[in-house]
């Protein structure tokens, strides 16, 4: 018999990952209590550790990304205008 997949909320995943991070219980005990697989608990714990630095970021990285995206859109627009102009001149 195949079990169906469960979709867990972000808050549930965070709660389980924080408990795993505290290391007051084994991963197996936490997994058993929340009825998830132990490897899933470890995956959520790793994701929490990897993403934790983003909580304390000052947002400068996001501003730089937004500026880059704006610059790239401007270049795309410029290239479209140039292409349309050349197509008109060549008669295609």
Image (cartoon, helix red, strand yellow):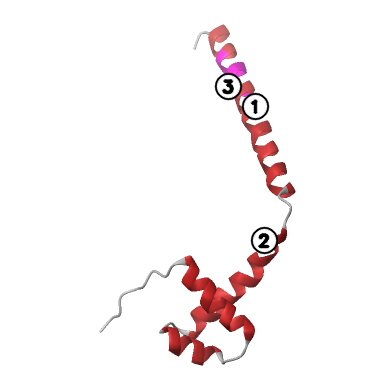
81 magenta-colored: yes
41 magenta-colored: no
- Work out whether mark 3 precedes mark 2 in sequence or the reverse, and give the earlier one: 2
The image quadrant of residue 49 is bottom right
The image quadrant of residue 68 is top right
Compared with 77, 26 (above or below) is below
**How far apart, in angstroms, are the residues tagged by discs 2 and 1?**
31 Å
For mark 2, what is the residue?
Answer: 55
Compared with 78, 50 (above or below) is below
Q: Around disc 1, counting alpha carbons within 10 Å, would you say few (fewer than 14), some (14 to 19), or many (20 or more)?
A: few
Image quarter hosting the N terminus: bottom left
**How far apart, in angstroms, are the residues tagged by discs 3 and 2?**
39 Å
- Work out whether mark 1 precedes mark 3 in sequence or the reverse, and give the earlier one: 1
**Secondary element at image label 1:** helix
Q: Residue drawn at (68%, 43%), measured in percent from left and top? A: 65
Q: Are marks 2 and 1 in contact (CB under 8 Å)?
A: no
Q: Which residues are magenta?
A: 79-84
In the rendered structure, find residue 22 and report the number of the disc placed on it: none
For mark 3, what is the residue?
Answer: 80
Q: Position of residue 13 (x, y in %)?
A: 50, 72
- Chief SS of the magenta region: helix
Tell which tag, 1 or 3, sits nearer the viewer: 1
Which is more toward the observer, 89 or 2?
2
Q: Residue drawn at (49%, 85%), measured in percent from left and top? A: 38
In the rendered structure, find residue 74 and report the number of the disc placed on it: 1
């Amino acid at each position: 018999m195949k079990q169906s997949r469960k979709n867990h909320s972000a808050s549930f995943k965070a709660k389980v990952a924080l408990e795993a991070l505290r290391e007051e219980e084994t991963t197996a005990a936490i997994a058993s209590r929340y009825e998830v697989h132990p490897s899933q608990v470890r995956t959520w714990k790793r994701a929490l550790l990897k993403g934790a630095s983003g909580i304390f970021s000052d947002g400068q990285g996001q501003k730089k990304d937004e500026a880059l995206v704006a610059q790239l859109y401007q270049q795309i627009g410029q290239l479209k205008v140039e292409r349309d102009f050349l197509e008109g001149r060549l008669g295609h």
